[in-house]
Image (cartoon, rainbow, N blue to C red):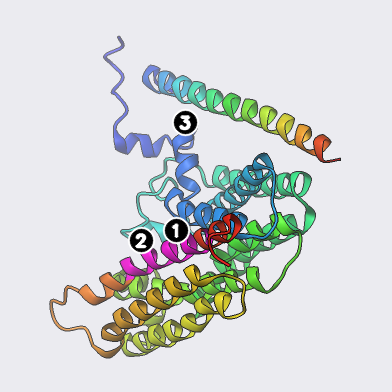
Amino acid sequence: MDTASPPISPTSAAATAAALPAEWRDFFTLTKPRVMTLVIFTAICGVLAAPGSIHPVLGFTAILAISMGAGGSAALNQWWEADIDKGMKRTMNRPLPTGRMRREDARDFGIFLSATSVCLMGVAIGWLAAGLLLGAIIYYAVIYTMWLKPRTPQNIVIGGGAGAFPPLIGWVAVTGEITAMPMLLFAIIFFWTPPHFWALALFVQSDYAKVGIPMLPVVAGEKVTRRQIMFYTLLLTPVAIAPWAIGGTGWIYGSVAVVLSALFIALALPVATRMKAADDTMLPEKRLFKYSIVYLFVLFAALVADRVAAYQGWIA
Amino acid sequence: MTPEEETEYRRRQKSRNLVVAGTLLFFVVLFYAITMVRIGDG
């Protein structure tokens, strides 16, 4: 063994990132696997809850294409925001801020994954679903990440649209048409995102302020943010109940939506009516944030359970 | 490039190549399955 050459230390690893090819695991990390679980879950729910049937191979392909599109746009998001990510505790260990990967590699990977996902969806499923997927990728990577996120405190409201696409695309992959029900699924995630993310932003707001992202708590202040959380929670409630109200689902979904929404309001109320004190543990905000994740998972699971029950003839 | 970096370079290249090969194989099987389903439909 050549003892004259020092082993690669973490610091020298960062310095030689340009020379060494990135690990495949870093490309995987670039797709934001944790966010992906929600994307995959809601896309599966969209496919399973849609009327009609799809061959399992095609259903799997549709979900794969949606996941690849989400991964590609996440990579493009990190390519664009590498400098911002470097300044935030939550994101500073990502492959680009740590120097484990070259920026151009992230960009090329994002473009390749996005383009492949749209082509796969178009060829295997249909061009309406592929067009929606392309729209979702452009919406997230360009309209949200590059244009509106650094410019408006309403960035989260706009960004919510990007996360709302998976169940819509999943549904359209089965039916081949855009109707009221998939639009309502889109609207549920759209109105769910602001209270979900602003609850998080309330207890990590110093990080956003540091990197100059105009997050609502930073720009408009805590009081306005808390009021907006309540506003969007109240808007979410009728939207979440609407699929049952218009006859698109049965009582299983309807009752779950009513109970979950009532609980959401109950947890948003203390967040909306209080102000941060010195040495505040931000428990109500953290509780609301955690509950919002459970809310979405259970609501969409109820949608599928309702559809399965109707299909089996257990409910009318 | 030092010998250690050279070794690390080869290791990363090899693991990436294996992942790419696995992904390509997966897509070959997937496209075969999609084609079969589509032919069955049509």
Residue A94, position in %: x, y? 40, 49
Marks 3 and 1, how far apart in space?
21 Å
Q: Are marks 1 and 2 on the same chain?
A: yes
- Name the residue at 31% across, 76% down: A202
Q: Is residue A290 left or right of residue A138?
A: left
Q: Are marks 3 and 1 on the same chain?
A: yes
Residue A58, position in %: x, y? 69, 43
Name the dominant secondary structure of the magenta segment: helix
Helix, strand, or loop for circle 3? loop
- Name the residue at 26% across, 14% down: A3
Q: Which residues are magenta?
A: A289-304
Residue B32 position (above or below residue A50): above
Q: What residue is pinned by disc 2? A: A87
State which chain disc 3 sits on: A
Marks 3 and 2, how far apart in space?
24 Å
Q: What residue is pinned by disc 3? A: A20
Q: What residue is pinned by disc 1? A: A83
State which chain disc 2 sits on: A
Name the quarter where the N terminus of chain A is drawn: top left
Report crowding for label 3: few under 14, some 14 to 19, many 20 or more residues within 10 A (C-alpha). Answer: many
Asked which quadrant contains residue A209, the reply is bottom left
Q: Kindly give the residue lying farthest to the left in the view shown.
A: A279
Helix, strand, or loop for circle 2? loop
Q: Nearer the viewer, residue B23 or A146?
A: B23
Q: Nearer the viewer, residue A69 or A237?
A: A237
Q: Are marks 3 and 2 on the same chain?
A: yes
- Kind of residue at disc 1: Asp
Helix, strand, or loop for circle 1? helix
B40 magenta-colored: no
Q: Are dots 1 and 2 in contact, CB under 8 Å?
A: yes
Report crowding for label 1: few under 14, some 14 to 19, many 20 or more residues within 10 A (C-alpha). Answer: some
- Kind of residue at disc 3: Leu
